[in-house]
Amino acid sequence: MSDIWGYQPTTGYTAGNTLTGWKVEATDGSIGKVDKHSDEVGSSYLVVDTGVWIFGKHVLLPAGTVTRVDAAEEKIYVDRTKEQIKAAPEFDKDKHLGDAGYHEEVGGHYGRHRAV
């Protein structure tokens, strides 16, 4: 299995590009906009502000869920459904920056729920 916390080379993402404010598309529709992101090796992710979709919550998406980055449209496509994303462990802004167990939990969720 590929590294869930790294961008795949085929996505079109270039390290150092800002994705903040870009729209995020699940396989079955829009889920929100990027609030912040990281392209740190082995710990790359998107934090997505879901707006009203799940009551203004944020979700953490490992970079390995990204299938395509469209710079022209400022959209990021992920290979998970809205339901898979909604069912993920709740985003915890304190835990996600240093709690390896939290990253394992989130990575495990997305690793188990791969799109087919």
Image (tube, helix red, strand yellow):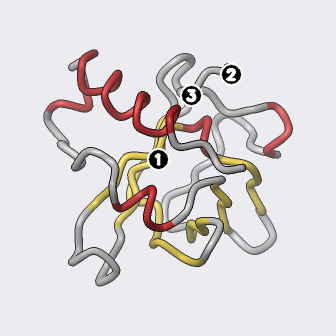
| Residue furthest to the bottom | 52
Q: Quadrant of residue 8?
A: top right
Instruction: Using the image, determine if residue 6 lies above or below residue 12.
Output: above
Task: Locate residue 114, reporting x and y percent.
Answer: 60, 43
Question: In the drawing, what numbered circle is on residue 46?
Answer: 1
Q: Which residue is mark 3?
A: 4
Instruction: Sort mark 2 into few (<14), some (14-19) or many (20+) by Cα contacts within 10 Å.
Output: few
The residue nearer to you, when weighing 17 against 22, is 22
Residue that appears at 34% across and 80% down: 53
Residue 75 percent coordinates (x, y): 67, 67
At 77% across and 62% down in the image, what residue appears? 71
Q: Is residue 42 above or below residue 25?
A: above
Pointer 2 with pointer 3, Cβ within 8 A: yes
Residue 83 placed where, x, y %?
43, 65
Query: What is the spatial separation of the Cα atoms under label 3 and label 1, in whole angstroms?
Result: 12 Å
Amino acid at pointer 2: Ser
Residue 13 figure quarter: top right
N-terminal label among 3 and 1 = 3
Type of amino acid at the residue the image marks with label 3:
Ile
Q: Nearer the viewer, residue 112 or 105?
A: 112
As measured in the structure, the alpha-carbon distance from the residue carrying label 2 to the one carrying label 3 is 6 Å
Q: Nearer the viewer, mark 3 or mark 1?
A: 3
Give the image location of residue 88, x and y in percent: 33, 49
